Image (cartoon, grey):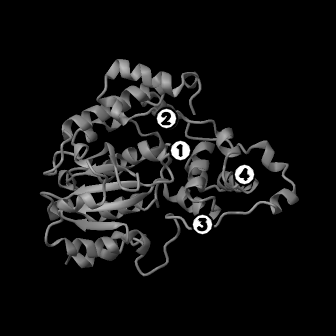
Amino acid sequence: MLKLKQSRTAKQIDRDLHMELGEGPLRFGPVHVERPLRELLLENPQGVAGLNVFASLSVHWNRCSNCRKKSYTDAQIFRILRFTKFDERRALGLMKRADPRRFHLNAFDQQAQLKTKTLFPVPNLRTLEESPCFYMRPSRYDPRKTPTNVIIDNLIYVMETYASRDVEHEKGIAFIANMNNWTFDNFSTDYCFKFMQVLQGRSFPAKVNLFLIVNPPSWFDKIWNIMKSMLSTKFQRKVHMIPEDELPFFFKQGFEKYLPDEFIEGKADTAEIVDDFIQYRQALERATGKGPKRQILFQLFNRRATTVPKDVHGLSEKMRAETTFCQEESDTTEVTDEHSASSPPSRVEAQLQ
């Protein structure tokens, strides 16, 4: 949470960044400043019940000897809880699968990977449902040369730039995969499995609500059969394999202006998008104290104290009874259907033979 830097408002930071960077990088704004945890807790949609669940989850996590190996801040625990619709069981499962290090990724450490133009956000490109978008050129990733964790960090960092914003976290994010020039050398089951886990919100609190696989090769059905075993039935309905001339069915009129120029109708300079994104994020992270120095501090002090809001312990049973606990379905639910989202790579290797 921002402290010294928090005294500057989002508008002030926006103004300073505009003076420093100019119009281009500001496409990735506006600035989002973290809100205090206490404020988020008091405004949580579950009211008293939400506070109770947060307190219970925090205490449970910090009393578990195995769990304490992973260090989450209270703000991160609340973020996960909100993402799972205040379902304590689902939140606990996500905390066990997630890596808290990935809440602290920054544009300085990600710069080299971002410059490969493999995966990056696309400013101002919105779907018909107003979801923001990120783009990937899978042919630029070679699992034989680049460790899986590198591309997963890239993916989570980009998704987090959207998902961390209060205004965006409920909408979900759209993902466009441009399959031009993609070959089987760009695929591995380990990479695919971990990637699909992130897209479904099973290993980080962010979700994709539309997945467009554009211009897939004619033999992609073989890969799709493998991918399906890694996806829930619900998520499979969010996936569309299309030629690029069908993109207008998913975006607002005039979207071509913002579409990367690696598509025939795309007008936005791909290299410029990536350079502007790196400039903007690095300047923003310097301005808000979230650069490499903060990552070093996280690594040095990877322990957290159990801090539960005092208000929670004094809640009366009457107040608890009067509050309804939300049981809405979440994309992070444990999958129990025939297309399990947690199928390990070993189960699908045989399909490649």
Quick check: marks 1 and 4 in contact, CB under 8 Å?
no
Regarding mark 1 in the picture, which secondary structure is present there? loop
Q: Which residue is mark 2?
A: 32
User: Which residue ends up furthest to the bottom in the rendered image?
Assistant: 338
Residue type at mark 1? Answer: Asp
Residue 37: image location, x then y, percent: 64, 40
Q: Residues within 10 Å of mark 4 (few under 14, many from 20)?
A: many
Q: Looking at the image, is mark 4 or mark 2 nearer the viewer?
A: 2
| Image quadrant where one finds the N terminus | top right
Residue labelled with disc 3: 328
| Total tally of numbered discs in the picture | 4
| Residue 147 drawn at (x, y percent) | 28, 51
The residue lying toward the viewer, choosing from 240 and 93, is: 240
The residue singled out by tag 4 in the image is 51
Relative to the observer, which residue lies in front, 28 or 83? 28
Q: CA distance from mark 2 to mark 1?
A: 9 Å
Query: Which mark is on residue 276?
Result: none
Mark positioned earlier in the residue sequence (4 or 3): 4
- Give the Cα distance between marks 3 and 2: 27 Å
Q: Secondary structure at mark 4?
A: helix
Q: Going 55% across and 49% down the picture, which residue do you hit?
A: 70
Nearer the observer: mark 1 or 4; the answer is: 1
Toward which corner of the image does residue 56 lie, by quadrant?
A: bottom right
Q: Is residue 246 visible?
A: yes
User: For this view, does 126 lie left or right of residue 186?
Assistant: right
What residue type is disc 4 on? Answer: Leu
Q: Is residue 16 above or below residue 300?
A: above
**Residue in the picture at 71% in, 42% down:** 307
Residues at circles 3 and 2 in contact by the CB criterion of under 8 Å: no
Say few, some or many: other residues with alpha carbon within 10 Å of mark 2 (under 14 / 14 to 19 / 20 or more): some
Left or right: 154 in relation to 71: left
Which type of secondary structure does the marked residue at label 2 adopt? loop
